Amino acid sequence: MMQEMAGLGFEWVELSHGIRITLVPGILKAVEEGVIKVASVHNFCPLPPGIGHAAPNLYLPSSRDARERDQWLRQSKRTVDFAAQVQARKIVLHLGSVSFFWFNPAKKLDAWIEAHAGAEVAGDPAYQKLLAQCIAKLKKQMPPYWENTKTGLAQLLTYAAEKGVLLGFENREAFDELPLDADHPALITALAKPGTCGYWHDAGHAQIKQGMGLLDHRAHLEANAAHTIGFHLHDVSAEGRDHQPIGTGKIDFEMVSSFWKPEHTLVLEFSPRLTTEEVVASKLRVTELVTKRFR
């Protein structure tokens, strides 16, 4: 796996939340032999024993079940240890979600968008009224879940800082996932000691949220620019499918690249259905944008 990435011209990789424990010996060997370097790791990595599929939300820090929160912390610390072992500087994390026993408002939004395919939601009064109602319901339900997440992060942050690993909090694509998009700056300000955590921008997720009328992509980048440490780069098709080749969908990557800084980590995060040619073409496009941005 690592040799294949190196053969495509990549010097660095992110190890994802789909890395099975059986792959670890080969990864360590590749790093030790200098086949490739690891820039970042995505929680949970490696996967817990017995889990053979990508599972970034296997345990949630927001859960009301204390046993699940304990497992989240335990497995996240394991990811920190692994990141330090492969000399990765950054970890990408999901921060949980708000749970609804009945009537998750996200279903109403999804149903409206599906019934009005192609509608411009930003200018539709009926959708905006529904959106405001759904956001109000989400915020009313959110406090205990959000407090659990912040408590878990405070514990993990101390452990990661001791290992010299930076935590990156990723923006999410689903309506009920945490943090709410507007809460990223305040979270990082509240938790941060210098060089311990930051914001991780997923371009595809932000584009999906923009399509739902939940944010403006550029404004969201501006609001988080001071704390950004990395990017997941992939495009979103006209039908709303993400993890597509760069330049084939709706994302304005010229705009996104204007926020890049030399210290940021840029990760191409694609669907496994992409061809080798599409991956290479995307790498070339991002390289062109990097060259243009930094001369």
Image (cartoon, rainbow, N blue to C red):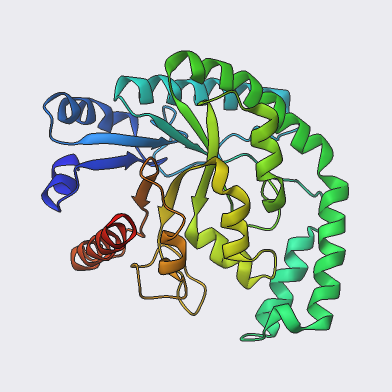
x and y percentages locating residue 141 in the rendered image? 85, 46
- Asked whether 227 or 40 is in front, the reply is 227
- Asked whether 281 or 177 is in front, the reply is 281
For image coordinates 70% across by 30% down, the residue present is 190
Q: Quadrant of residue 173?
A: bottom right
Residue 137 can be seen in this image: yes
- Asked whether 129 or 194 is in front, the reply is 194
Q: Quadrant of residue 272?
A: bottom left
Q: Considering only vertical position in the picture, is 61 above or below 130?
A: above
Quadrant for the N terminus in the image: top left
Q: Considering only vertical position in the picture, is 200 above or below 91?
A: below
Using residue 38 as the reference point, say whether residue 244 is left or right of it: right
- Asked whether 45 or 122 is in front, the reply is 122
Residue 169 can be seen in this image: no
Q: Considering only vertical position in the picture, is 58 above or below 160?
A: below
x and y percentages locating residue 44 in the rendered image? 46, 33
Residue furthest toward the front? 295
Total labels drawn: 0
For image coordinates 66% across by 27% down, the residue present is 191
x and y percentages locating residue 275 in the rendered image? 23, 66
x and y percentages locating residue 78 in the rendered image? 45, 21
For image coordinates 72% across by 78% down, the residue present is 122
Q: Considering only vertical position in the picture, is 69 above or below 129?
A: above
Quadrant for the C terminus in the image: bottom left
For image coordinates 46% across by 70% down, the residue present is 236
